[in-house]
Image (spheres, helix red, strand yellow):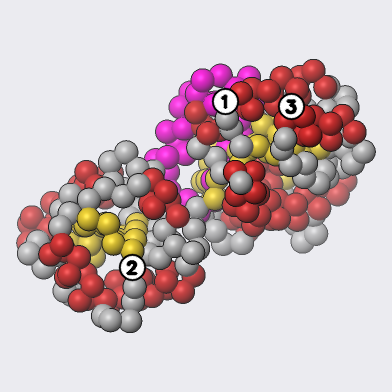
Amino acid sequence: MSKPLLVAWGHEFVDEVLDALGPDLEMEVVVGKPTVDQWRTAPLVVIDARCRTLANGLPAHPRMEVVAPVALYGERLAEVIRAWRADYPDAAAYALPRAAQGLRESVATAAVSRQAVEVRVGVVGGHGGAGATTLAVAIALAAADEGRRALLVDAVGRGGVNDRLGTASTSLRVVDAPDLPAEAIERTSAEVKVVDLDRALDGSQVDAARLCDVVLLVANVQRNAMASRRVAQRLAGAGVPFAMVPTWTNDRVAQALAEECAVRLLREVPLDPPSVFSDGRVYLVGHCDLLALARELVHHAPSVAARMAA
């Protein structure tokens, strides 16, 4: 798994940070601009406070820490930190040498976990009423219920997400972004990002879908084969990694469509209202088949994406 990532403008800064960390902590070091893959898969990013351009064009990272070297102090230090917080309000800021202990603790924690902290899941319906928005809300709530910072992007823009969201959660942030969903995904930091996509899959929707680790196509294909096939073909044609999620156990047409598109067929979405939600909304409850599936999808999304890419 990936190590914590140190992004520096020069080797002097690298030496200063590594000296502050001590000999027992290891980091992946990049002098200059890292790749998107290095950035996204690092459990923690430590970045040189003197140069914000190192982060330009890269997505918001759920655990980014800005470190100022000893040479940066006084009003100049305050000015630099203000500028970072204006662009990246969730980033922690440290100033060496006085913050060395806090930085060591943060890097040590990330080194132990050594896991990619961001998961991106897109959800799209094969037809109206398939249950895609319900599943998207359930995944976001399940992630938040586990204490993970979650982002739910409403890329459809017809209020469906808010209509389904029954339980408020301090760990869940909801963003309404039907026009520029990709920007919301990239610029908002979270550990789990869930995107409720519009099945029309126009240009901006496809851009957002491409940013996801995996897109889940929810459909009763048996009932609406033509519409579901159209969505599947658009995803496949755009090169978007996706998996089929049937709403009916014995949907043989869904199985055939999954084979045709060479994608995985996951287990069905349990959308029986008495066991899933009340008054049309999804709630965090003790026993709920839909939330159990949502937790499973959050945990396995990276491996599902890796299998599809192989």
Residue pointed to by mark 2: 27
> Which amino acid lies under the numbered mark 1 shown in the image of this protein?
Ala
Within 10 Å of disc 1 (Cα), the crowding (few <14, some 14-19, many 20+) is: some
> Which amino acid lies under the numbered mark 3 shown in the image of this protein?
Gly
User: Which of these two is toward me, 304 or 284?
Assistant: 304
Instruction: Please identify, in this view, whether the residue under mark 1 or under mark 3 is nearer the observer.
Output: 1
Magenta residue check for 271: no
Within 10 Å of disc 2 (Cα), the crowding (few <14, some 14-19, many 20+) is: many
Residue in the picture at 45% in, 55% down: 41
Percent x, y for residue 141? 64, 51
Q: Secondary structure at mark 3?
A: loop
- Which label's residue is closer to the chain start, 2 or 3? 2
Whole-number angstrom distance, CA of label 2 to CA of label 3: 44 Å
Percent x, y for residue 232? 70, 26
Q: Secondary structure at mark 1?
A: loop
Residue pointed to by mark 1: 238
Percent x, y for residue 145? 63, 58
Above or below: residue 128 compared with residue 132: above
Whole-number angstrom distance, CA of label 1 to CA of label 3: 16 Å
Residue in the picture at 79% in, 34% down: 259
Above or below: residue 186 compared with residue 41: above
Magenta-colored span: 179-206
Above or below: residue 6 compared with residue 183: below
